[in-house]
Amino acid sequence: MDFNASLRRAIKTGKVLLGQNVTAQCIESGSARMVVVARNCPEKFLEMLKSRENLFVHTFDGSSVQLGKACGKPFMVSALVVVDPGESDILSLKRA
């Protein structure tokens, strides 16, 4: 599975929200199906994620700049949440 291609497909066909604040809101509301964080995501945010049970968190093998580029955005993305994967197979990472 090509993670970057799956991520772009999820962004295009599903519902993927970018940013730590929106990600935290989706976790609170229970709508988060998967959280992706950059390797350099702030420690305080990572601690909050670790305190949550039954939350699937994938660490992107790259910086927030690289995660932003993988999303097709011209800015840094340290965290994102997949609410609906659309036609993407990105949630198959849960089984890997």
Image (cartoon, rainbow, N blue to C red):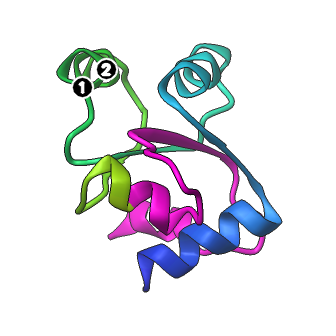
Judge whether residue 78 is colored magenta. yes
Q: Residue at x 30, y 57 (%)?
A: 60
Q: Report the mark closest to the observer, 1 or 2.
A: 1
As drawn, which residue projects farthest toward the front?
A: 74
Q: Residue at x 42, y 32 (%)?
A: 54
**Snapshot quadrant of residue 13:** bottom right
Give the percent coordinates (x, y) of residue 48. Answer: 31, 15
Residue 54 versus residue 88 in the image, above or below = above
Spot occupied by residue 7 in the image (x, y as percentages of width and height): 56, 67
Q: Which amino acid type corresponds to the residue marked 2 in the rendered image?
A: Phe
Apparent side of residue 61 relative to residue 83 in the rendered image (left or right): left
Mark 1 touching mark 2, by CB under 8 A? yes
Q: Which numbered circle lies on residue 42? A: 1
Marking on residue 45: 2
**Quadrant that contains the N terminus:** bottom left
Determine the residue positioned at 47% across, 55% down.
68
Along the line of sight, which residue is nearer the eye, 60 or 58? 60
Name the residue at 56% across, 22% down.
27
**Disc number for residue 63:** none
Dot 1 amino acid type = Pro
Q: Quadrant of the C terminus?
A: bottom left
Mark 1 and mark 2: Cα distance apart in space: 6 Å
Label 1 crowd (10 A; few <14 / some 14-19 / many >=20): few
12 relative to 65 in the view: left or right: right
Q: Which residues are magenta?
A: 67-96
